[in-house]
Amino acid sequence: MMMSALKAGGMDLIIDQVRTADPNNPRGYFEFERVKKLPKGDTRWLKQAGGKAIKIISALLQFLPDDYHYKVIFMERDLDEVLASQQRMLERSGKPLNSRDEEDQIRKSYLDHLEEVSAWLSKKDWIQTLFVSYNDILHVPEEEFPKIASFLSGKVDPDAMISVVDPRLYREKGN
């Protein structure tokens, strides 16, 4: 949703259309496959990324070189919703989790990961981070998108971003 909102707000995106829309994400993924090669040192594409948005999963942030400055919009989501969404995706692919123990281990790993990434980001003076609640965007986008526009130095139109929020796509609700 964030990449779609940034695009609607007028920001240029770095995407490649390799991963297309599917039942798990009917509006598409807004991804760039080369991001997955960051751990192998593939960073040449960053030269053309200035002022543009790119989706990078939290586990790959540590591979960004420190010779650039970055603004990271870190999307936070209710963990129960994340796990429910992952379970639905696994079920659709025929690989559901088999036990509560598996889910508990994934939950612990995810929480540990978030703690590590947050601590790492806080120590990097070349990365500015804005933590944003997915749920707040769904419920009060008129309050959240202006914060994002401010963080991005006014490079996006927060009113235009509101148009992408579609509660019908909010399928995995927490308890």
Image (tube, rainbow, N blue to C red):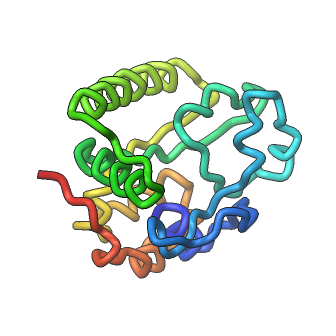
Residue at 25% in and 34% down: 99
Name the one closer to the observer, 153 or 148. 148
Query: Does residue 46 appear left or right of residue 136 in this picture?
Result: right
Vertical comparison of 170 with 117: above or below: below
Vertical comparison of 146 with 162: above or below: above
Query: Does residue 88 appear left or right of residue 17 in this picture?
Result: left
Q: Residue 102's x, y, as percent?
A: 30, 30
Name the one closer to the observer, 138 or 39. 39
Residue at 18% in and 53% down: 174
Residue at 62% in and 26% down: 62
Q: Residue 53's x, y, as percent?
A: 64, 56
Q: Residue 45's x, y, as percent?
A: 85, 46
The quarter of the image holding the N terminus is bottom left
Q: Residue 124: name its quadrant.
A: top right
Q: Residue 10's x, y, as percent?
A: 61, 73
Name the one closer to the observer, 53 or 27. 27
Query: Does residue 20 appear left or right of residue 84 in this picture?
Result: right
Vertical comparison of 53 with 106: above or below: below
Name the one closer to the observer, 165 or 112. 112
Vertical comparison of 155 with 35: above or below: below
Query: Does residue 157 appear left or right of residue 44 in this picture?
Result: left
Q: How many marks?
A: 0
Residue at 52% in and 18% down: 123
The residue at the far left in this view is 175
